[in-house]
Protein backbone atom coordinates (compact mmCIF):
# COMPACT_ATOMS: atom_id res chain seq x y z
CA UNK A 1 0.00 0.00 0.00
CA UNK A 2 1.20 3.49 -0.82
CA UNK A 3 1.63 6.65 1.25
CA UNK A 4 -0.06 9.91 0.26
CA UNK A 5 1.74 13.17 1.06
CA UNK A 6 -0.42 16.27 0.70
CA UNK A 7 1.48 19.56 0.54
CA UNK A 8 0.16 23.06 1.07
CA UNK A 9 2.70 25.06 -1.00
CA UNK A 10 2.13 28.40 0.74
CA UNK A 11 1.77 27.36 4.39
CA UNK A 12 3.84 29.39 6.82
CA UNK A 13 4.13 32.27 4.35
CA UNK A 14 6.11 30.29 1.75
CA UNK A 15 6.15 31.46 -1.86
CA UNK A 16 4.01 29.44 -4.30
CA UNK A 17 7.15 28.35 -6.17
CA UNK A 18 8.16 26.38 -3.05
CA UNK A 19 5.76 23.63 -4.12
CA UNK A 20 8.21 21.84 -6.38
CA UNK A 21 11.00 21.92 -3.81
CA UNK A 22 8.71 20.56 -1.07
CA UNK A 23 7.48 17.78 -3.35
CA UNK A 24 11.03 16.79 -4.26
CA UNK A 25 12.08 16.73 -0.60
CA UNK A 26 9.15 14.51 0.36
CA UNK A 27 9.80 12.15 -2.53
CA UNK A 28 13.48 11.89 -1.62
CA UNK A 29 12.72 10.91 1.99
CA UNK A 30 10.28 8.17 1.02
CA UNK A 31 12.46 6.85 -1.81
CA UNK A 32 15.42 6.56 0.57
CA UNK A 33 13.29 4.27 2.74
CA UNK A 34 11.87 2.21 -0.15
CA UNK A 35 8.39 3.55 0.50
CA UNK A 36 5.90 3.84 -2.35
CA UNK A 37 4.58 7.40 -2.13
CA UNK A 38 2.23 9.65 -4.04
CA UNK A 39 2.93 13.36 -3.58
CA UNK A 40 0.20 15.95 -4.16
CA UNK A 41 0.17 19.75 -3.99
CA UNK A 42 -3.02 21.57 -3.03
CA UNK A 43 -4.44 24.17 -5.39
CA UNK A 44 -7.34 25.69 -3.46
CA UNK A 45 -9.16 25.62 -0.11
CA UNK A 46 -10.74 22.22 0.46
CA UNK A 47 -8.40 20.47 -1.96
CA UNK A 48 -6.45 18.73 0.82
CA UNK A 49 -9.67 17.16 2.07
CA UNK A 50 -10.53 15.90 -1.41
CA UNK A 51 -7.06 14.44 -1.89
CA UNK A 52 -7.18 12.72 1.50
CA UNK A 53 -10.58 11.18 0.78
CA UNK A 54 -9.26 9.84 -2.51
CA UNK A 55 -6.24 8.37 -0.71
CA UNK A 56 -8.54 6.57 1.74
CA UNK A 57 -10.52 5.16 -1.19
CA UNK A 58 -7.25 3.85 -2.68
CA UNK A 59 -6.44 2.14 0.65
CA UNK A 60 -3.36 4.22 1.44
CA UNK A 61 -1.59 3.01 4.57
CA UNK A 62 -0.73 6.57 5.71
CA UNK A 63 -1.74 10.09 4.69
CA UNK A 64 0.69 12.88 5.58
CA UNK A 65 -0.27 16.56 5.75
CA UNK A 66 2.56 19.03 5.08
CA UNK A 67 1.26 22.40 6.19
CA UNK A 68 -0.25 24.28 9.11
CA UNK A 69 -3.25 23.59 11.31
CA UNK A 70 -5.70 24.44 8.49
CA UNK A 71 -4.18 21.85 6.15
CA UNK A 72 -4.01 19.32 8.97
CA UNK A 73 -7.69 19.99 9.71
CA UNK A 74 -8.72 19.28 6.12
CA UNK A 75 -6.79 16.02 5.96
CA UNK A 76 -7.88 14.91 9.43
CA UNK A 77 -11.54 15.54 8.63
CA UNK A 78 -11.25 13.09 5.71
CA UNK A 79 -9.51 10.48 7.89
CA UNK A 80 -11.88 10.73 10.88
CA UNK A 81 -13.58 7.43 11.73
CA UNK A 82 -11.29 5.63 9.25
CA UNK A 83 -8.40 3.23 9.86
CA UNK A 84 -5.92 5.28 7.81
CA UNK A 85 -3.61 7.25 10.13
CA UNK A 86 -2.52 10.86 9.80
CA UNK A 87 1.10 11.98 9.69
CA UNK A 88 2.14 15.62 10.09
CA UNK A 89 4.96 17.65 8.56
CA UNK A 90 4.55 21.05 10.26
CA UNK A 91 5.07 24.25 8.27
CA UNK A 92 2.37 26.63 9.46
CA UNK A 93 2.39 29.99 11.19
CA UNK A 94 1.89 28.47 14.65
CA UNK A 95 1.87 24.65 14.36
CA UNK A 96 -0.23 24.31 17.50
CA UNK A 97 -1.15 20.65 17.20
CA UNK A 98 2.29 19.57 16.00
CA UNK A 99 3.92 21.28 18.96
CA UNK A 100 1.56 19.60 21.41
CA UNK A 101 2.24 16.20 19.87
CA UNK A 102 5.99 16.72 20.04
CA UNK A 103 6.45 16.43 16.30
CA UNK A 104 9.86 17.41 15.00
CA UNK A 105 9.73 20.94 13.48
CA UNK A 106 12.01 19.81 10.64
CA UNK A 107 9.64 18.53 7.92
CA UNK A 108 11.92 15.76 6.64
CA UNK A 109 12.54 14.39 10.11
CA UNK A 110 8.83 14.64 10.90
CA UNK A 111 8.13 12.52 7.82
CA UNK A 112 10.74 9.94 8.83
CA UNK A 113 9.16 9.75 12.29
CA UNK A 114 5.64 9.36 10.86
CA UNK A 115 6.76 6.54 8.57
CA UNK A 116 8.11 4.59 11.53
CA UNK A 117 5.46 5.44 14.11
CA UNK A 118 2.88 3.12 15.58
CA UNK A 119 -0.48 4.93 15.12
CA UNK A 120 -2.54 5.72 18.18
CA UNK A 121 -6.02 7.19 18.61
CA UNK A 122 -6.71 10.83 19.36
CA UNK A 123 -9.91 12.79 19.83
CA UNK A 124 -11.59 15.11 17.37
CA UNK A 125 -13.79 18.04 18.33
CA UNK A 126 -16.76 19.42 16.44
CA UNK A 127 -18.22 22.93 16.43
CA UNK A 128 -21.41 23.65 14.50
CA UNK A 129 -20.83 20.51 12.44
CA UNK A 130 -17.22 21.37 11.56
CA UNK A 131 -14.49 19.04 12.89
CA UNK A 132 -11.33 20.32 14.52
CA UNK A 133 -8.20 18.70 15.89
CA UNK A 134 -6.61 21.57 17.79
CA UNK A 135 -8.75 24.55 18.89
CA UNK A 136 -12.06 26.08 17.85
CA UNK A 137 -13.90 29.09 19.16
CA UNK A 138 -15.61 32.44 18.87
CA UNK A 139 -14.47 35.88 19.88
CA UNK A 140 -11.17 37.63 19.37
CA UNK A 141 -9.26 34.74 17.79
CA UNK A 142 -12.04 34.12 15.26
CA UNK A 143 -12.14 37.84 14.48
CA UNK A 144 -8.39 37.87 13.79
CA UNK A 145 -8.51 34.62 11.80
CA UNK A 146 -11.26 36.00 9.55
CA UNK A 147 -9.09 38.99 8.67
CA UNK A 148 -5.95 36.90 8.28
CA UNK A 149 -7.78 34.55 5.87
CA UNK A 150 -9.46 37.40 3.99
CA UNK A 151 -8.78 37.95 0.31
CA UNK A 152 -7.33 41.39 1.00
CA UNK A 153 -4.59 40.11 3.29
CA UNK A 154 -1.37 39.51 1.39
CA UNK A 155 0.91 39.26 4.40
CA UNK A 156 1.06 35.64 5.51
CA UNK A 157 3.01 33.84 8.21
CA UNK A 158 3.41 34.68 11.88
CA UNK A 159 4.36 38.32 11.25
CA UNK A 160 1.19 38.92 9.25
CA UNK A 161 -0.98 37.30 11.91
CA UNK A 162 0.68 39.28 14.71
CA UNK A 163 0.18 42.54 12.83
CA UNK A 164 -3.55 41.91 12.40
CA UNK A 165 -3.91 40.84 16.04
CA UNK A 166 -2.17 43.97 17.30
CA UNK A 167 -4.53 46.24 15.35
CA UNK A 168 -7.56 44.20 16.41
CA UNK A 169 -6.72 44.61 20.08
CA UNK A 170 -7.55 48.28 19.68
CA UNK A 171 -10.83 47.93 17.82
CA UNK A 172 -12.35 44.58 18.85
CA UNK A 173 -15.57 44.75 20.92
CA UNK A 174 -16.44 41.65 22.99
CA UNK A 175 -19.92 40.13 22.89
CA UNK A 176 -21.95 38.53 25.65
CA UNK A 177 -22.23 34.74 25.47
CA UNK A 178 -24.35 32.17 27.24
CA UNK A 179 -22.74 28.72 27.41
CA UNK A 180 -24.86 25.76 28.42
CA UNK A 181 -23.19 22.64 29.83
CA UNK A 182 -25.00 19.51 31.01
CA UNK A 183 -24.84 20.70 34.63
CA UNK A 184 -23.98 24.40 34.45
CA UNK A 185 -24.77 27.70 32.74
CA UNK A 186 -22.02 30.28 32.13
CA UNK A 187 -22.78 33.82 31.03
CA UNK A 188 -20.00 36.28 30.29
CA UNK A 189 -18.99 39.31 28.27
CA UNK A 190 -16.01 37.50 26.85
CA UNK A 191 -13.09 38.28 24.63
CA UNK A 192 -12.54 34.54 24.04
CA UNK A 193 -14.71 31.43 24.11
CA UNK A 194 -12.60 28.47 23.08
CA UNK A 195 -13.21 24.76 22.82
CA UNK A 196 -9.79 23.13 22.93
CA UNK A 197 -8.65 19.64 22.04
CA UNK A 198 -5.00 20.53 22.70
CA UNK A 199 -3.49 23.14 24.95
CA UNK A 200 -2.27 25.85 22.57
CA UNK A 201 -3.09 28.07 19.64
CA UNK A 202 0.48 27.72 18.36
CA UNK A 203 3.92 29.20 19.02
CA UNK A 204 3.54 27.88 22.60
CA UNK A 205 0.64 30.26 23.36
CA UNK A 206 -1.26 27.99 25.76
CA UNK A 207 -4.89 28.90 26.28
CA UNK A 208 -5.87 25.56 27.88
CA UNK A 209 -2.89 24.26 29.89
CA UNK A 210 -3.39 20.62 30.77
CA UNK A 211 -5.56 19.80 27.76
CA UNK A 212 -4.60 16.54 26.06
CA UNK A 213 -5.72 15.11 22.76
CA UNK A 214 -6.66 11.60 23.85
CA UNK A 215 -8.61 11.96 27.12
CA UNK A 216 -12.07 11.81 25.54
CA UNK A 217 -12.74 15.41 26.58
CA UNK A 218 -12.58 18.94 25.23
CA UNK A 219 -11.55 21.92 27.36
CA UNK A 220 -13.93 24.88 27.42
CA UNK A 221 -12.15 28.16 28.13
CA UNK A 222 -14.00 31.44 28.64
CA UNK A 223 -12.05 34.65 29.16
CA UNK A 224 -14.33 37.44 30.34
CA UNK A 225 -12.91 40.88 29.66
CA UNK A 226 -12.64 43.07 32.72
CA UNK A 227 -10.96 45.86 30.75
CA UNK A 228 -8.86 46.14 27.63
CA UNK A 229 -5.89 47.14 29.77
CA UNK A 230 -6.29 43.94 31.79
CA UNK A 231 -6.47 41.92 28.58
CA UNK A 232 -3.27 43.44 27.27
CA UNK A 233 -1.52 43.03 30.61
CA UNK A 234 -2.41 39.32 30.86
CA UNK A 235 -1.65 38.28 27.28
CA UNK A 236 1.84 37.14 28.25
CA UNK A 237 0.36 34.60 30.65
CA UNK A 238 -0.33 32.29 27.70
CA UNK A 239 3.43 31.96 27.24
CA UNK A 240 4.27 31.41 30.89
CA UNK A 241 1.75 28.69 31.76
CA UNK A 242 -0.18 31.01 34.08
CA UNK A 243 -3.14 31.93 31.86
CA UNK A 244 -5.44 30.36 34.45
CA UNK A 245 -4.61 33.27 36.78
CA UNK A 246 -6.06 35.79 34.33
CA UNK A 247 -9.01 37.67 35.86
CA UNK A 248 -12.23 36.35 34.30
CA UNK A 249 -10.66 33.05 33.18
CA UNK A 250 -12.99 30.03 33.39
CA UNK A 251 -12.06 26.47 32.45
CA UNK A 252 -14.25 23.37 32.30
CA UNK A 253 -13.59 19.88 30.91
CA UNK A 254 -16.56 19.00 28.70
CA UNK A 255 -17.99 16.44 26.31
CA UNK A 256 -20.54 18.86 24.88
CA UNK A 257 -21.65 22.48 25.12
CA UNK A 258 -23.97 24.99 23.49
CA UNK A 259 -22.73 28.55 22.89
CA UNK A 260 -25.36 31.26 22.35
CA UNK A 261 -25.16 34.96 21.51
CA UNK A 262 -27.69 37.64 20.63
CA UNK A 263 -26.01 38.07 17.22
CA UNK A 264 -24.74 35.64 14.56
CA UNK A 265 -21.27 34.42 15.45
CA UNK A 266 -18.17 34.13 13.32
CA UNK A 267 -16.27 31.11 14.58
CA UNK A 268 -13.12 29.25 13.65
CA UNK A 269 -11.99 25.64 13.65
CA UNK A 270 -8.20 25.28 13.60
CA UNK A 271 -7.92 28.81 12.23
CA UNK A 272 -10.42 28.41 9.38
CA UNK A 273 -13.41 30.73 9.79
CA UNK A 274 -17.14 30.27 9.18
CA UNK A 275 -20.27 32.35 9.67
CA UNK A 276 -22.61 30.73 12.15
CA UNK A 277 -25.94 31.55 13.70
CA UNK A 278 -26.82 32.65 17.21
CA UNK A 279 -26.34 29.11 18.57
CA UNK A 280 -23.32 26.83 18.13
CA UNK A 281 -23.06 23.28 19.45
CA UNK A 282 -19.75 21.68 20.39
CA UNK A 283 -18.99 18.05 21.13
CA UNK A 284 -16.11 15.59 21.26
CA UNK A 285 -15.57 12.41 19.25
CA UNK A 286 -13.24 10.30 21.42
CA UNK A 287 -10.53 8.39 19.58
CA UNK A 288 -11.98 9.24 16.18
CA UNK A 289 -8.61 9.80 14.46
CA UNK A 290 -5.51 7.64 14.16
CA UNK A 291 -2.34 9.73 14.46
CA UNK A 292 1.14 8.53 13.45
CA UNK A 293 3.50 10.13 15.98
CA UNK A 294 6.39 8.83 18.05
Image (cartoon, rainbow, N blue to C red):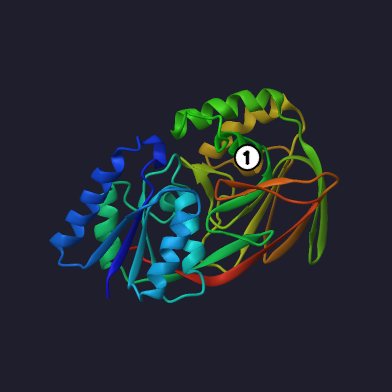
Q: Position of residue 225 (x, y in %)?
A: 75, 35
Q: Position of residue 192 (x, y in %)?
A: 69, 42
Front-lying residue, 9 or 121: 9
Front-lying residue, 63 or 191: 63
Q: Quadrant of residue 238?
A: top right
Q: Say above or below: 180 vs 234.
A: below
On the rendered image, what quadrant is the C terminus found in?
Answer: bottom left
Q: Position of residue 246 (x, y in %)?
A: 67, 38
Q: Say above or below: 53 vs 259.
A: below
Position of 26 compared to 189: left or right?
left
Residue that numbered label 1 is attached to: 141
Q: Is residue 84 visible?
A: no
Q: Is residue 175 visible?
A: yes
Q: How many marks?
A: 1
On the rendered image, what quadrant is the N terminus found in?
Answer: bottom left
> Which residue ends up furthest to the right in the rendered image?
262
Q: Please tell me how crowded label 1 is: few (under 14), some (14-19), or many (20+) other residues with Cα within 10 Å.
A: many
Front-lying residue, 115 or 100: 115
Q: Residue at x 76, y 35 (%)?
A: 174
Q: Say above or below: 114 vs 147.
A: below
Position of 288 compared to 280: left or right?
left
Position of 177 compared to 152: left or right?
right
Q: Position of residue 90 (x, y in %)?
A: 37, 49
Q: Say above or below: 232 vs 7.
A: above
Q: Quadrant of residue 63?
A: bottom left
Instruction: Give the SS element for disc 1.
Output: helix
Q: Residue at x 60, y 32 (%)?
A: 235
Q: Residue at x 41, y 52 (%)?
A: 98
Amino acid sequence: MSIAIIINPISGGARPDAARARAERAAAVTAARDELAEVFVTERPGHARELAKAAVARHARLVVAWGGDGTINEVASALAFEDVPLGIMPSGSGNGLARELGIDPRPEQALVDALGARPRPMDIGELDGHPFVNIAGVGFDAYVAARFNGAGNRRRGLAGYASIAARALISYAPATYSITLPDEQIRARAILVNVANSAQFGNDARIAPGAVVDDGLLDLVVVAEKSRLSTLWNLSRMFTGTVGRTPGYTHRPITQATIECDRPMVFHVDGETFEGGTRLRARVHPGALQIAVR
